[in-house]
Amino acid sequence: MSTDSLTFIFLNALIINNFVLSLFLGICPFLGVSAKLNTAWNMGLATTFVMFVSSLCAFGLNILLVALDMEYLRLIAYIAVIASAVQLVEMVMKKFSPTLFRALGIFLPLITTNCAILGLALFQTFRDYSFLQSLVYSLGAGGGFALAIMLMAGLRERLDLSFVPDVSQGAVLSLMLAGLLSLSFMGFAGLGS
Amino acid sequence: MVDLHPNKPITLETFTRGIWEENPVFVMLLGMCPVLAVTNSGANALAMGIATTFVLVCSSILVSLLRHRIPKQVRIATYIVIIATFVTIVDYVIQAISLELYRALGAFIQLIVVNCIILGRAESYASKHRPSKAIINALGTGLGFTIALLCLGLVRELLGSGALFGINIFGDSFQPWAIMILPPGGFFVLGTWLLLFSWMRLRKEGKPTSQEKEAGYHEH
């Protein structure tokens, strides 16, 4: 499988170099919104959508910045684009699904500071992906984020029913679980070669 | 915690609060992405800590100076632009000083922009206090962040490659625990540190744990 093929890019972002479990991007929502499977699924969906839109915008923006010879403004421009995309998603969600809007609460505007999204925009620029490659990459990354957060939520829902010592409750347990998940995702590392 | 008396004089507490009581990583669980991602060696952890502290201090000063001029409605956007400006500076400076370090830290230098610690400090502290206090507070928080990064980086480097800051400690017979410098190691080491702190907190409060309650331990 060539590293430029669309299938490889998709699989790479989805499982081999999973954004959350092996690149450590988007840890905050991964630990914060993974208590319930349903919320986790919605968060994954919203993040994937924002990733898709901002990847699209970042691609166009980068061409413009390179043409104008203003690459030093890249970071500021990307952040502005992502913030607007999040605002858009927020408005759409408020209109069409107020319940979901309330369920996600503070974490919706916080997608702006989700490093997975800015990371995606930066990676696709560093790697000189074409338009189609960028789109596939953003879908893979979004899917990988949704996969990781849902696996985590499934595990945590199960753990609610079991006995956990006081000392390891909360963040400690979540991090240990994340470590185990990350360990199992390392098994995919050989897939690319 | 918001300081309710913006005109109170600067005390030692302004500085130390960010290091221990409100340690951004161990207590508030903020800025986890760089904490886990760049701590596979002590040197990377230290560089990341210094870079973040620089951005934190500079943006705190600027936000604090402009605190009466920034309109409330667009404050978050303004903070982000200020932070992004300093991150761009750091990005170019590190690239100029050491290309090797720049490659090792990768996109995580630019991702300082979305580190919630910095935006959090700007919103909850710098925008409400005068510059001198904001600097002290930012320095404390930055130091707390750097210490946390080093706590992870040193343990992971020691176990994962048997060295500290690149200097071999255990000798050649040491079999490196490679998983520690790989992604899962980050989660495990941070989890263990938090476990330690949570154990210490429970000990200090002296509350019986649920196991002890179950065994009727404190009733006797």
Image: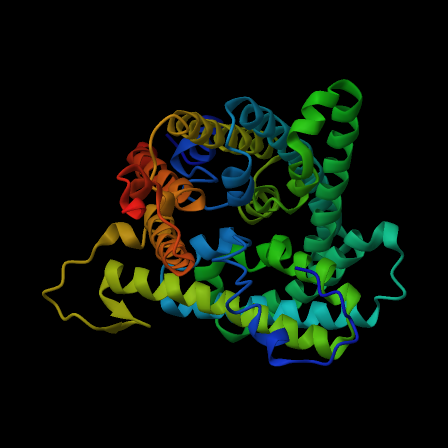
Of residue B178 and residue B5, the one placed in the foreground of this image is: B5
Question: Percent position (x, y) of residue A4?
Answer: 46, 35
The residue drawn where x is 49% and y is 57% is: B106
The residue drawn where x is 64% and y is 60% is: B118
Please tell me whether residue B13 is drawn above or below residue A190 in the rendered image.
below
Question: Percent position (x, y) of residue B184?
Answer: 34, 46
Q: Residue furthest front?
A: B220
Question: Percent position (x, y) of residue B178?
Answer: 24, 53
The residue drawn where x is 73% and y is 58% is: B123
Number of disc labels: 0
The residue drawn where x is 47% and y is 58% is: B26
Quadrant in the rendering for residue B127: bottom right
Please tell me whether residue B188 is drawn above or below residue B49 in the rendered image.
above
**Colour logic:** rainbow
Q: Quadrant of the N terminus of chain B?
A: bottom right
Question: Percent position (x, y) of residue A42?
Answer: 60, 25
| In this rendering, position of residue B39 left or right of residue B138 | left
Q: Residue furthest left?
A: B173
Residue B8 shows up from this direction? yes
